[in-house]
């Protein structure tokens, strides 16, 4: 369970006479440069499987064209939270949402009962933990989403498939075997193929659910570079159990524990001086 | 040092157990194969002299030397076609519905148990059911290839459903999730992914079911297969390729028929030894038909495995 | 992880050890001056080796722990603090050596009437060292902040001693040699105060994550080594 921190608590914040010495008064918080617009916002989001409340009153802002990482110990709800964004929970019985997730600028409530989950999934793509390409050719994998949207023109398909494979940094390895089976690719290549598949349809948000936990370090590092580069095209939310990955790759980090959002902030600050004691204990390895 | 010795003795005992178990397994297989081999050998030896083109293209006759299996194998083939057209679509659709669409509650659990039970029902019961349901009821389908095909189709249906369900279950959930994440509806996921990837297993299971059906005698007798038919159904010709354009009017569905197992049964019940030879020869043909169906199954599975690689 | 935390504690103890040695070196140097007994300086010279050795060890451990453990938050701030405080303590120790060296000239010459406010300045400087180290050990940010305010007192002492000695040198040229040594000692003590201030700033950085160096009211810490 929770190990006690090794450092004793700081002795005090004020002198005996109650005054706060000059040096300790706030010297001005780090100024945020002009913030990018909000892409999605969760307000009082809660989620339950049957009687188990997996998410409790989450409020968070996901900023456009930025990478937001979700960290926390196993079972804290970070994957559950991510899967609310593309309504994956609808596939399984006994799930219920409360609150809302608003997608901007269209102002759609992603989890609204009247909103079609298929439409949501066309705007929010997902890359899963274990690479799961279809047992079809590389071309057909990437083209699937486009075909679902009714694209029939062969030239257009070719073009979009190539663009997607280039954006996923796998074009060079794939271009000579577009019509070979995707299962022949290595794990890292398969994962990049899944990223290309998700990118082919120009999603607004791309959700990554522990995308590198099944990959070796070289493949992991390529995917991380890719995630970093993709932020210019798309807003990214990434769940990871590897804190160093979150520190390397993200602009903002959210720390979750037992279904609640404990702290959310700029990644630089979260990892050098987090505000919440629980966050500090988790990232320094004193529990979890 | 003593511990090492004990360890070696222990390992040696375990290895001995391995060898004994392997030997027992091999012995069991040997017994099975030898018995089967002996049967086949006897069958072929008895029937070989009678296998000829005339045998293949003649009608049965009171004279053993002139009797043939034309009506029998044509009957069997036509019945198989009807069986296939009944069992496959119904079975695959039912399997898909039960696995992908039906909610998981007590009702579907009961259905699942019952389907497994139906697969084990003795085939003569199917015959009796068909007699009441198809032949003598208001449906009045009569004693026809249509009835025989439907009966055997229903008999084979549980097997097709079960193998469809097994094939679908072996598709990992991650593939479905990937499809949904691309924006597919449930039907699109089923049609584009579930069915194609499960097709190998579905076909294999279906052909196993059909192989069983081709040898079923009891239900056919119950619903009135005849054992002496000296004509072919409407639309068939007596010379190769045994078809005329009238075949496509489907009038043969209503025709009387016989089947290979029935013909064999009829011949073997006669005292004349030469009819026994005929029966053996017919048996060889029956086995060949079964084997070729299995070969088609294996071939299809191989081709599909190449296209759909996990 | 447990091993990492033990290693952090071990490093902390090294820094505390350095602090104890440095404090006693300053105390020894000042006692030698006030009691006019050069024998007390032998101990000071002896301890310098230990302090230098500890500084190298602290830096080495800090670099290794950073490379191998990828520390974050308080842990990474601690490692930077430990390395920097090690540097400051080593310089305080150098100042103590310098005081001993300058005291030699003062003790050789006849005693001065009066001995100025040097003892009080020495006390003030020693208190700053003691308090900044106590703030580190007890994780007391308020005490650290108070050390920053004490710096003004030490500076005031220095200015006053300088002007007194300047007058004296003008009136009595024979006393220039001794007066210069005393000026240098005052400078040494003022540097000790500066370094103690830096230690206190590091402690605040470690505990609160705020970098209060160079901010309002706190004088810029000088970085050059003082030569005798």
Image (cartoon, helix red, strand yellow):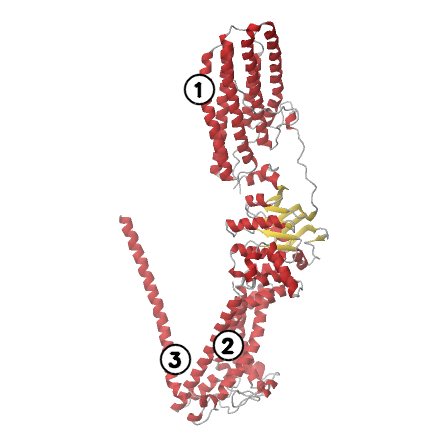
Is residue B262 or residue B135 the one in the foreground?
Answer: B262
Q: Is residue A256 above or below residue C63?
A: below
Is residue B185 or residue B213 the one in the foreground?
Answer: B185
Q: Is residue A97 above or below residue C31?
A: below
Mark 3 or mark 1, whichever is nearer to me: 1
Q: What chain does mark 3 sit on?
A: B
Q: Which mark is residue B210?
A: 2
**Distance CA(mark 3)–CA(mark 1):** 104 Å
Q: Residue C46 carries which label?
A: 1
Mark 1 Cα-neighbour bin, 10 Å: few <14, some 14–19, many ≥20:
few
State the image coordinates of residue C185 (x, y, percent, origin top left). 54, 15
Quadrant of residue A23 within the rendered picture:
top right
What residue sits right under mark 3 in the picture?
Answer: B40
State the image coordinates of residue A50 (x, y, percent, origin top left). 61, 54
Q: Respond whether the residues carrying marks 3 and 1 are from the same subunit.
A: no
Mark 3 Cα-neighbour bin, 10 Å: few <14, some 14–19, many ≥20:
some
Q: Respond whether the residues carrying marks 2 and 3 are from the same subunit.
A: yes
Is residue C205 or residue B155 the one in the foreground?
Answer: C205
Q: Secondary structure under badge 2?
A: helix
Give the residue at the far bottom of this rendering. B63
State the image coordinates of residue C2 (x, y, percent, origin top left). 48, 38
State the image coordinates of residue C156 (x, y, percent, origin top left). 62, 16
Give the residue at the far right of this rendering. A106
Q: In this view, does A277 lie above or below B276?
A: above
Is residue C83 or residue B211 the one in the foreground?
Answer: C83
Please indicate whether residue C7 sits to the left or right of residue A194 in the image: left
């Amino acid at each position: 369970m929770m190990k006690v921190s090794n450092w004793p608590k700081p002795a005090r914040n004020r002198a005996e006479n109650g005054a706060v010495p000059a040096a300790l008064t706030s010297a001005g918080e780090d100024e945020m440069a002009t913030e990018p617009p909000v892409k999605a916002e969760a307000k009082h989001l809660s989620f339950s499987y049957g009687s188990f409340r997996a998410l409790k009153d989450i409020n968070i802002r996901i900023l456009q064209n930025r990478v937001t990482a979700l960290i926390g110990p196993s079972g804290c709800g970070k994957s559950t939270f991510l899967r609310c964004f593309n309504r994956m929970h609808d596939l399984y019985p006994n799930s219920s949402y409360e609150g809302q997730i608003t997608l901007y600028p269209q102002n759609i409530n992603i989890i609204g009962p009247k909103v079609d989950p298929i439409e949501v999934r066309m705007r929010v793509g997902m890359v899963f933990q274990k690479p799961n390409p279809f047992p079809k050719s590389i071309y057909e994998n990437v083209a699937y989403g486009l075909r679902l949207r009714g694209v029939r023109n062969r030239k257009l398909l070719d073009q979009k498939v190539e663009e997607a494979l280039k954006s996923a940094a796998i074009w060079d390895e794939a271009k000579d075997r577009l019509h070979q089976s995707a299962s022949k690719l290595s794990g890292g290549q398969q994962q990049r193929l899944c990223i290309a598949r998700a990118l082919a349809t120009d999603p607004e948000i791309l959700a990554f659910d522990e995308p590198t936990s099944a990959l070796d370090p070289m493949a992991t590092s390529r995917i991380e570079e890719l995630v970093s580069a993709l932020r210019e095209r798309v807003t990214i939310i990434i769940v990871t159990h590897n804190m160093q990955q979150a520190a390397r790759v993200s602009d903002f980090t959210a720390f979750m524990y037992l279904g609640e959002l404990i702290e959310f902030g700029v990644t630089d600050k979260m990892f050098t001086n987090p505000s919440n004691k629980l966050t500090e204990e988790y990232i320094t390895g004193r529990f979890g | 040092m003593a511990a090492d010795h004990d360890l070696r003795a222990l390992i040696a005992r375990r290895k001995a157990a391995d060898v004994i178990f392997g030997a027992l397994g091999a012995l069991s297989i040997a017994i099975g194969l030898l018995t089967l081999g002996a049967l086949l050998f006897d069958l072929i030896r008895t029937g070989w002299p009678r296998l000829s083109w005339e045998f293949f293209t003649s009608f049965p006759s009171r004279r053993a030397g002139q009797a043939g299996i034309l009506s029998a194998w044509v009957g069997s083939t036509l019945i198989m076609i009807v069986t296939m057209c009944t069992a496959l679509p119904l079975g695959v659709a039912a399997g898909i519905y039960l696995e992908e669409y039906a909610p998981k509650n007590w009702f579907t659990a009961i259905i699942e148990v019952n389907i497994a039970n139906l697969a084990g029902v003795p085939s003569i019961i199917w015959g009796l059911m068909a007699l009441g349901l198809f032949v003598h009821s208001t449906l009045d389908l009569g004693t026809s290839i249509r009835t025989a095909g439907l009966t055997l189709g229903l008999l084979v249906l549980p097997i097709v459903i079960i193998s469809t369900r097994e094939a679908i279950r072996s598709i990992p959930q991650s593939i479905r999730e990937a499809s949904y994440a691309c924006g597919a509806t449930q039907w699109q996921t089923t049609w584009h992914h579930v069915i194609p990837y499960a097709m190998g297993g579905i076909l294999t299971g279906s052909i196993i079911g059909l192989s069983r059906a081709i040898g079923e005698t009891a239900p056919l007798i119950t619903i009135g297969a005849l054992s002496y038919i000296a004509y072919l159904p409407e639309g068939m010709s007596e010379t190769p390729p045994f078809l005329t354009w009238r075949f496509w009017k489907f009038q043969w569905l209503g025709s009387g028929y016989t089947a290979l197992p029935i013909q064999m049964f009829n011949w073997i019940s006669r005292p004349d030894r030469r009819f026994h030879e005929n029966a053996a020869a017919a048996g060889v043909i029956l086995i060949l038909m079964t084997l070729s169906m299995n070969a088609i199954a294996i071939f299809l599975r191989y081709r599909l495995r190449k296209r759909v690689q996990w | 992880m447990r091993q990492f935390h033990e290693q952090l504690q071990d490093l902390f103890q090294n820094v505390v050890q350095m602090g104890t040695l440095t404090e006693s070196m300053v105390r020894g140097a000042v006692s030698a001056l006030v009691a006019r007994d050069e024998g007390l300086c032998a101990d000071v010279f002896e301890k310098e080796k230990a302090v230098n050795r500890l500084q190298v060890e602290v830096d080495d451990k800090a670099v290794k722990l950073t490379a191998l453990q990828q520390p974050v938050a308080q842990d990474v701030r601690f490692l930077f603090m430990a390395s920097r405080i090690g540097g400051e303590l080593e310089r305080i120790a150098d100042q103590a050596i310098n005081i001993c060296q300058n005291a030699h000239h003062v003790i050789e010459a006849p005693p001065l009437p009066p001995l100025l406010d040097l003892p009080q300045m020495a006390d003030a400087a020693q208190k700053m060292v003691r308090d900044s180290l106590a703030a580190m050990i007890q994780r007391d940010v308020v005490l650290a902040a108070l050390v920053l305010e004490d710096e003004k007192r030490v500076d005031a002492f220095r200015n006053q001693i300088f002007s007194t000695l300047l007058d004296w040198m003008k009136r009595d040229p024979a006393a220039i040699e001794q007066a210069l040594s005393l000026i240098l000692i005052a400078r040494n003590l003022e540097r000790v105060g500066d370094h103690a201030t830096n230690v206190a700033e590091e402690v605040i950085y470690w505990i609160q994550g705020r970098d209060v160096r160079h901010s309002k009211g706190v004088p810029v810490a000088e970085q050059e080594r003082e030569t005798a």
